[in-house]
Amino acid sequence: MILWVNNMKITVLTENISNSNKFESEHGLSLFIETSKYNILFVMGQSALFIRNALSAGIDLSNVNFAVLSHGHYDHGGGMKHFLQLNHTAPVYVNKNAFGDYFNASFKYIGLDKELSKSNRLISVEGEKTIAEGITLFSCNEKPRPNDKGSFGLSELIGGEYIPDKFLHEQYLLIEECGKKVLISGCSHKGILDIVSWFKPDILVGGFHYSKIEDNKELEDAAKILNSYNTTYYTCHCTGIKQYELMKNFMSKLNYISCGDIINIK
């Protein structure tokens, strides 16, 4: 499926589902972003699947200029070692907190392979970082979060104690091109309502982290708030299909993207 949004193109390499036999799927996310000047890889799923899907899409990842890791979870950074082996030059921008000890609600480790932190290809980012003209990373760790939903049972092990994850390891990619602000938000752990209020993007691509929310009224209220912005949303991964389908009833510019889908921004 091609979703027309001239100069920027985003191809979904990894997502939880695939609508074509041509592409495999897994729990995770990976996006190949082509701007007028750069090829960007935004996160790398949990395995080498994103590379196989890139080949199926006719994309050569050795031509990636730089990569971005959204946060320190395996389903976004598990494929990093495969990318570093395939592409020998592109730097990978990671938040300075990306290699912390992160766990899910069952206290299973969901963080990154700490051996990768030794790679000289990694560039540690704290706060705001301009990568190139019109391409900026933000962590927004000092921003207020009036709509904070908590950690959803996710935690960080600090000093032998499991502490609710504040997601200080999460960062967002803002691309300003074609007269538009395109925000790639990853999993939006800090809260999609607050993230949209901070950036007010024309286009947002990312998960809402709503898959655990069962309260229909809560989803309806969130959808109405998101719909009040002049933003087109391409959601995926941690939003949840059931949650997406409910929110779609209240959002005129909400789309779901899966493996192999293409967003053309013009």
Image (cartoon, rainbow, N blue to C red):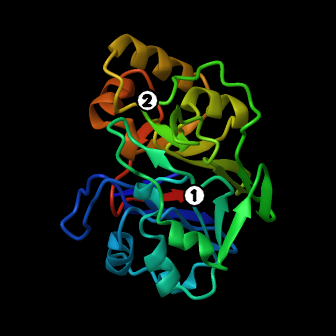
Q: Residue 152 carries which label?
A: 2
From this view, report whether residue 23 is shown above or below residue 190. below
* Picture quadrant of residue 90: bottom right
- Residue placed most toward the observer, 8 or 240: 240
Q: What element carries label 1?
A: loop
Q: What element carries label 2?
A: loop
Label 1 or label 2, whichever lies nearer to me, is 1
From this view, report whether residue 138 is shown above or below residue 89. above
Residue 239 locus on image (x, y percent): 39, 37
From this view, report whether residue 49 is shown above or below residue 103. below
Q: How far apart are marks 1 and 2 (CA)?
A: 20 Å
Quadrant showing the C terminus:
bottom right
Residue reaching furthest left?
21
The reply, left or right, for residue 254 in relation to residue 64 is left
Q: Residues within 10 Å of mark 2 (few under 14, many from 20)?
A: some
Q: How crowded is mark 1: few (under 14 residues within 10 Å), some or many (20 or more)?
A: some
- Which residue shows up at 31% across the image and 20% down it? 214
The reply, left or right, for residue 95 in relation to residue 51 is right
- Which residue shows up at 35% across the image and 33% down it? 211
Residue 130 locus on image (x, y percent): 80, 60
Residues tagged 1 and 2 counted as in contact (Cβ below 8 A): no
- Residue placed most toward the observer, 92 or 104: 104
- Residue placed most toward the observer, 133 or 166: 166
The answer to whether residue 216 shows anywhere in this view is: yes
Disc 1 target residue: 99
The answer to whether residue 40 shows anywhere in this view is: no
